[in-house]
Amino acid sequence: MKHILLFIILIGTSFTGLRAQELFVFSEPASNMPSKSLGVRITNEVQFNNPNFALRTMPEFMIGFNKNLMMHAQGFLSNMDGKYQVEGGSFYAKYRFLSIDALKTHSRASVFGRVSTSNRPTFTKDINLEGDNGGLQGGLIFTQLLHKLALSATVGYAHAFKNYDRQIVGMPMPNNMLSYSLSSGYLVSPTVYKNYKQPNFNAYVELLGKTDPSSGQSYLDIAPAMQVVLNSTTRIDLGYRFQATGNMDGRYAKNMFLLRAEFNFFNVLK
């Protein structure tokens, strides 16, 4: 009986203070995955303005070392340059340095960093460290939970590695990029929790923007999404990202559909 109760408590807090409505689709929350846990994601991004149909697949492995530190390892594959092939990879780390908890509410703050590689040529000033560019990024995330509503803000700064061997003459060479986002998530169902096997349905709207400090070019995207969480361990995301305003030419993600499946394995590390 003791082991059953322990298991229920573990699953009930499966995302360790990370409520379902904080599982943002196009950005990361300040909260972390559970300590001593593993996760696997497979994300597909479909773009229709490449100018042709383009598919990018991103397998991802996640590990929660403790309640404050987690890491991701990603791979990138796509048909953006003709045949479907490997583009590169990425390592992402997030450290939570602030946690404030109260009844049905909490606040989180984290710092994150990413290093990426990519063998793609560059066609735009935009920097995307998830497949299009190699480089470094760091930033801050602040997340606030208010009962069924989660709000999160992210600010980051990225530097792209110079890829002279693959640089196309006459095409822009990206250098630095300021990124920022504001995300909201709302728990639609269930209205009352009865057990951990209840599916969670969540709705999201995210504002995703970037600015090139050297040229002043910028853009702002709107990204609505839907999500279902099953048995507190499996999540399925479906989202669409489109540009609301901007003057940055040659972007890849102007119109993009996202489909993701994620599987979590709790308390598997000793």
Image (tube, rainbow, N blue to C red):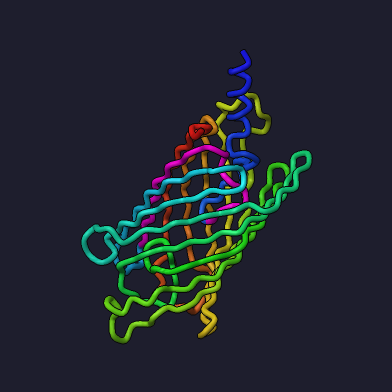
Residue 184 versus residue 236 in the image, above or below: below
Q: Nearer the viewer, residue 211 or 120?
A: 120
The answer to whether any part of residue 240 appears in the image is yes
82 vs 181, left or right, is left
| Image quarter of residue 47 | bottom left
Magenta stretch: residue 32 in it? yes
Quarter placement of the N terminus: top right
Q: Position of residue 270 (x, y in %)?
A: 51, 33
108 vs 270, left or right, is right
Q: Which range of residues does the magenta coloring cover?
A: 27-47
Q: Position of residue 214 (x, y in %)?
A: 52, 84
140 vs 174, left or right, is right
Magenta stretch: residue 150 in it? no
Q: Nearer the viewer, residue 110 or 236?
A: 110
The answer to whether any part of residue 245 appears in the image is no
Q: Residue furthest right?
A: 102
Residue 193 versus residue 123 in the image, above or below: above
| Image quarter of residue 14 | top right
Q: Nearer the viewer, residue 91 or 219?
A: 91
Residue under the image location 63 percent in, 41 percent down:
19
Residue under the image location 38 percent in, 82 percent down:
172
Q: Residue furthest left?
A: 83
Q: Count the marks: how many?
A: 0
Q: Position of residue 218 (x, y in %)?
A: 53, 77
Q: Position of residue 269 (x, y in %)?
A: 49, 35
Q: Residue furthest front?
A: 270
Residue under the image location 31 percent in, 86 percent down:
170
Residue under the image location 43 percent in, 53 percent down:
258
Residue 248 versus residue 254 in the image, above or below: below
Residue 76 versus residue 69 in the image, above or below: below
